[in-house]
Amino acid sequence: MTVTLTEKAAFKIRALLENSTTTGKANQKGIRVGVKTGGCDGYEYKLKIAKQPKPDDIVFEQNNVLIYIDPQSMPLLDGVAIDFADSLTQSGFTFSNPNAKKTCGCGKSFAAAADCASKGAASCG
């Protein structure tokens, strides 16, 4: 499995890439998707425009968008669907993660199932 972009998310990312001032080879400009420790539930999603992949990145393309993922983030992102919401109450990228046992109310952080098991089921609601 990999990370999936909805058409809306891919459209928004392509627009961001076209308008970015990040210099680099046009054919290597993409989006870096990752996770970092933090947020309400243990991990936070990271999205960043990247001019090229890092040497150890996992690289794939979807909907004409290059996606770069570091090997440490991949197990937590495997199967994630990224969408883009634009409404009166919410605007931004959203994540649907099959690896998340618990998510924060804002949807930007999550606890992984493996972390919940090691902390005890009660810690993940």
Image (tube, rainbow, N blue to C red):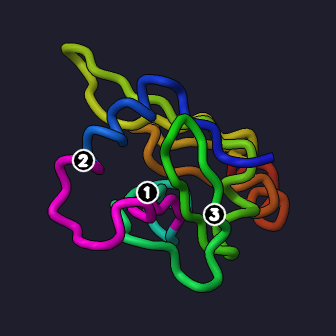
Q: Nearer the viewer, residue 24 or 81?
A: 24
Residue type of the residue flagged with mark 1: Ile
**For this view, does 10 lie left or right of residue 5?**
left
**For this view, does 4 lie left or right of residue 51?**
right
Residue type of the residue flagged with mark 2: Glu
Q: Is residue 31 inside the magenta stretch?
A: yes
Label 2 packing within 10 angstroms: few (<14), some (14-19), many (20+): few
Which residue sits at x=44%, y=65%? Answer: 28
Residue 4, x across and y down, in percent:
63, 38
Residue position for label 3: 59
Report the disc number at residue 18.
2
Q: Nearer the viewer, residue 19 or 84?
A: 19
Image mark count: 3
Kindly state the secondary structure of the residue where label 2 is placed: helix
Whether the residues at callouts 2 and 1 have beta carbons within 8 Å, the answer is: no
Quick one: quadrant of the C terminus? top right
Kindly state the secondary structure of the residue where label 3 is placed: strand
Question: From the viewer's perspective, is residue 10 above or below residue 45?
Answer: above
Which quarter of the picture shows residue 115? bottom right
**Range of residues picked out in magenta:** 17-35
Residue type of the residue flagged with mark 3: Val
